[in-house]
Amino acid sequence: MHLTAVHYFIIVAMAALQIVLGPVCYNIARRKEANPVKWLILGWLTGLFGLLFLTDDRRVVFLLIALAVVVPMVFHLPGIVATSPIVKAIFDKVESLPPGSNILLSYDYGPATVPENQPMADAMTRHVLVKGHHLFIMAVWATGERQAKLTVDSVVVKEFPDKVYGQDYLLLGYKAGNQGLINALYQSIRGMYTTDAQGKPIDDFPMMKGVENLRSMDLILCVGSGKPGIKEWVQFAGDRGNIPIAGGVTAVEATLLYPYYPRQLLGLMGGLQGAAEYEKALIDHYPQFKMTSITAVRYMGPQTIAHLVIIILVVVGNAIYFVTRKQQAH
Amino acid sequence: MAPRNFIILAIIAAVILVMLFTGAFSDFQSLKLWVGALLTLMIFSFLYKDNPFYKFAEHLFVGVSAAYWMTKGIQTTLWPNCLRPVLLDWFQGGAASVAADHLPFGVLPYGVARVIPAVFGLILLTRLIGPIGWLSRWAMAFIIGYAAGTNFTRYLQSDFVGQIYNTLLPVVNGPGAFGVFVAYAVIAAALILAYRFLIAGLQRGAGAVTTRSIFWIATVVFVLLFATKFPNLTVVTGVICGLIYFFFSVEHKGLFGWTSRIGIYMLMLAFGATFGYTVMARISLLIGRMSDLGTWLGRVF
Amino acid sequence: MRSMQFSMPKACAALCLVLSAFSGSLAEPILGDQQAAGVRALLPPRDVQAMDTPRDGGLSLTIRWQPPSGEEAGLLGYRIYRADSPNWEFRLVGQVDRNTMEYQNIPNDSIKVQMGKEYYYKVAAYDSLGEAMSEAVGPVKSRPTWFDIHRLPILVAIVLFFGSVLVFFRITKRGKGLFIRRIAGIAAMEEAVGRATELGRPVLYVPGIMDVDNIQTIASMVILVDVAKLAAQYDVPIIVPLNRAFVVPMAEESVRQGFLNAGRPDSYDPDNVRYLSDEQFAFTAGVNGIMVREKTAAHFFLGAFFAESLILSEMGFSTGAIQIAGTANIHQLPFFVVACDYTLIGEEFYAATAYISKDPQLLGPLKGADFMKVVIMALLVVGSLLELFGVHWLTGLLTLS
């Protein structure tokens, strides 16, 4: 990759930090009446890790994590991403549906979880539209409608100029009611949505012809980050009407939803990793998205490095804990 | 002026100067980027020490989020679902009701009928008024009853019967699986016997520590291989042992105690996975924030 | 002359022959051309059936058919027509592609299905040249299904669960004690309050951040009575910070009751039950402040918690206090397990309320739940063994669709 001034600055700064940490640890060790020479060498060898173990100051952890995230981002360090079966299941389902199928995409998240959820929503939108399906966009969260508009503006309008609003995609918008909304939509979409998000009667749109309720959908995709979310879609729509449900959630929610896979939930993207896996599958099949649908894949580099740092901290911390406990016991 | 206040003012003045110099006020997008970046840095400053900038950002967030949700609640819930239909029906006679439907027996148009849940909502607030606080129990009973009724069959279908159905799996499947299972069972028996007759009786010492370590590492590797080879059996065993852990009618002793212990180990594995996933989520959000800060820095420089 | 006379019958026969040959020759090229092209006239769909859609509340009708016999290369799809009577004009209600053999006539604004009204249907196969219409089928009318047989497992589960709860409720009401196993967190409560007494520092009890309509808050109030009783007996202050205004009277009542049960109503200090803030992290900051300023020695985090759980428990850990936590929010359990000395996991939290209060209304559901666990375990063991031998009877029984 082409190195710029910023990259060189960071390399020099990191090297300087590593060199300076030796004498800093030396001074602190002397003040704490520890072996200063040992800590001088440890400081040079382990850098911030050494400073952390010497001072026990949690702010060093903050600095470590910040560097673990920033440095890979600046150097565009890629992550190694392979699509897992649970994410591939969603991709394969969208692939296997015949063109013109009805797919509902529900935005059940807000700005707080955009880094995890937005890449999922964007990638699925690209996939649905490139396959020529009908995309119905709605939101069960009040903040979801804005996220949906972001996708429409930045993905649909820019990358799919041939797609016609009302014919290929439709923004239904947000309605209050949480799981009550899903319950009502199961009976009739027009009972809740008489107009689209812009106030136009939905019967004016060709793609609403023949679409009566959730059972008219061939697949329901949900991108969520809490309640109501995928769980409510499974309970109020999927299990009730045998409608295939899939989607993505923040990593916090993912473990709660794995019990539903695969019989109640077709597939699940868990967190940024899941989003990256879907993007990888999309790029492999549709190389035209290589430059646009790579947000989550790019983020996996810093994610991986940060995880490695945390693993090292956990392992070393536990080792020190057990050794200390043994010494105290003796 | 105290030195601390002077420093704060100096920082604010410096930031405003930089914003002016870099054209932050030239358009709304730039200003939005600057405000977002500055608030992010103010919140991050708490990592070093509590300070007035962090306090300001936190209070701003609390105030803005309270106001945002209040306006959202009025805009998306109160106005379209309650006030607008009631007012329209009142003044335009049924115009708000879908296809002019009425409550049964033509009692009230659906628009005006929404006054009833609105009244219940107001009754809920009477809890704060001592003498008539008992009225709120009616509204609360309605909410609880509705929630219980709506969720009851759904949870039973999806989370009870559905989950039992999902767990009915052939514990061993695939060609040659029985043979492999027997081999694994023999190894498991050997490990149990080794523990019973060899490991448990080891005395203290460097050799004992090494032997124990090797034994436990081998056991962990074996368990992982077993779980990978027989995932269905692992799932069914985990579910049953987990249920046994939460069984309160029998003391956890003997075989029951051992299966309960497996259950709690399974739970701890699940908690560890949840913890790890939560850490991943937080790092992802940090990456998002850093990305936005990077965009801001790119604009500034 | 006789040879030139025509007989009428012979003339007619000759004329008929000529005409049939002529019409045959007219028809022949059309059919012959089509036959030459390998295309024959479209046939209508077979075996058309119209029926009430099950389990839809009487809102729709389902029409099924089989494709026309023989290969229909030019077939484009099917059109479904409906009329109120077989002699009336049939109106188009829907259209599907050639691979679909079913159509559901569901209500929309223009073509309503009225419950209980009789309808007749026809299905036409169509191609680029025209349609081939089936015979009318009907009458068929939609009606709601009174009993959805596929939901029978749910009914059985409800009957079993409620039945067992009622049985155990009656048993406990009769005064017969029912065994509940020892729960480590409950046994540690007295130890925690005792340690606070030794250090001469107060106890902190946080009943979660949800409102009174949340079952975890109610369960927490039950345990608060017992913890307040212990605090009164050991003569140590108990501080209860609250996140919701509606919980304040309940918490005050619980603490007062606890002090009354210990025989020390005069020691109750209402200032120790404090409403801090509705905002999640403002409340968390307030509780952290109490831990640091008032140096609380025993912490109880029992109730519904969210993102603040780690902040609270980690701050409490750093102060050196003994901590007991309990919540049914599965997300937060890992943080409590890591940072607290004892954790009541999920249902143990509810079991603690039954264990402490010995209230039949709480013991009954606990025992009923235990009974259902036995049923579930039996189903899992039997079902898995049946699946192992390829018998899907039990799985089929539990399928809800």
Image (cartoon, rainbow, N blue to C red):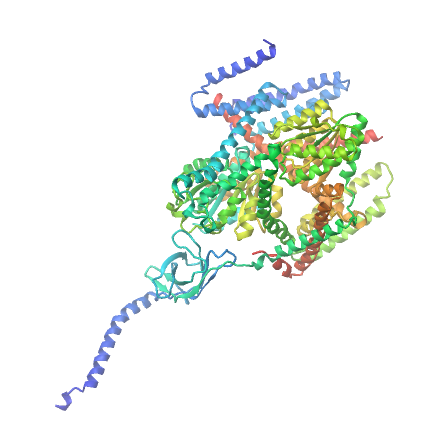
Q: Residue furthest left?
A: C1
x then y, percent, for residue C243:
63, 31
Q: Is residue A141 above or below residue C73?
A: above
Q: Is residue C139 above or below residue C14?
A: above
Most distant residue in the bottom direction: C2
Name the foreground residue: A119 vs C141. C141
Reply above or below: A70 against C76: above
**Residue at the image point whose x is 50% and y is 55% from the top:** C57
Which image quarter is the N terminus of chain B in? top right
Q: Residue furthest front?
A: B131
Where is residue C372? Give x, y as percent: 69, 52
Is C266 left, or right, of A67 in this rendering?
right
Q: Is residue B130 visible?
A: yes
Q: Is residue B35 left or right of residue C374?
A: left
Image quarter for residue B220?
Answer: top right
The image shows residue C19 at horizontal and vertical percentages of 22, 76
- Front position in the image: B275 or B291: B275
Q: How many marks?
A: 0
- Along the line of sight, the residue nearer the viewer: B113 or C344: B113
Instruction: Relative to B50, say whether B217 is above or below.
Output: below
**One can see residue C207 in this view:** no
| Coordinates of residue B266 in the picture (x, y in percent) | 71, 44
In the drawing, does residue C356 fall left or right of residue A292? right
